[in-house]
Every structure is written in C-alpha cells, then in structure tokens.
Image: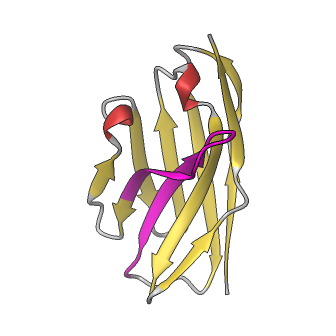
Amino acid sequence: QVQLVESGGGVLQAGGSLRLSCAASGTIFSINVMAWYRQALGKQREWVARITNVGFTNYKDSVKGRFTISRDNAKNMVYLQMNNLKPEDTAVYYCHLAQEGREYWGQGTQVTVSS
C-alpha cells in the first residue's frame, strides 16, 4: 500500500509564498508520476502540476511562472513551491501518485490566500 501525507499549508496574504511537501511511504516504484491537485470550495478538483520520476514537469497555465514542482526520489518526497500567491489559489491541495496503473491520494492541506 501507499500513503501520501501533505504538509505546509497555511493562511497568508496575497503575494506571499508557501512550500508544500508530500511524503510518500509504502511500495513506491521507480517509475511513477507525482502531482499536485487542488480543490476550491464548491468547485471540482483540478490538476496543478506534475513531475515524472526523471524530472519532466508540466503546469496548469494559471500557475506557470509562480509554482515550481520538484521531487527527491531518495526520500520519496514531492514539493510545490508557490510564489506570488493569489486569492484564487485558495484551496485544499492534494498530493497524487500514479504508478503501475493505480492512483493514490493524500488527505490534503489547506491553503488560504487573503487579498
């Protein structure tokens, strides 16, 4: 089994920065894709960024240039550095792992950005 635990969320003003972390434990295969999703209140969950095991990255257009996803394969960690945060970034942020045809989710961490 796989467990994902997020941390690093918080409350801050627009323009600030946060770094989210996700610790993966259990059976983690060397080939996988890790990602961050978010879900704002009353909205559907949306993809934010992904990173492959070899470091290829993709971003949602609205976060390009502000967010950076990275990972430490030795520690089974994935990070999301969020800069210049905006009120519309307010959401619960979820860590996601895809491997061997299966998907796993963390429980989420709240990020609240005030104007």
Q: Looking at the image, which residue is at 46% across and 65% down?
A: 34
Q: Is residue 75 above or below residue 27?
A: above
Decide whether residue 25 is among the magenta residues: no
From the viewer's side, name the closer residue of 40 and 107: 40
| Picture layout, residue 28 above or below residue 38 | below
Q: Nearer the viewer, residue 55 or 95?
A: 95
Q: Give the prevailing secondary structure in the magenta stretch.
A: strand
Image quarter hosting the N terminus = bottom right
The quarter of the displayed image where residue 111 is located: top right
Q: Is residue 26 above or below residue 106?
A: below
The percent position of residue 44, horizontal first and vertical second, equals 57, 50
**Residue 10 vs residue 61: left or right?**
right
Q: Is residue 22 above or below residue 87?
A: below
Q: What residue range appears in magenta?
A: 31-50
Please count the marks in the image: 0
Q: How is the image coloured?
A: secondary structure
- Is residue 97 left or right of 40 when viewed as pictured? left
Q: Is residue 61 left or right of residue 5?
A: left
Residue found at the far top of this picture: 115
Whether 41 is among the magenta residues is yes
* Residue 54 location (% of width, % of height): 29, 68
**Between 75 and 104, the one nearer to me in the picture:** 104
Percent of width and height locating residue 41: 69, 39
For image coordinates 41% across by 82% down, the residue present is 30
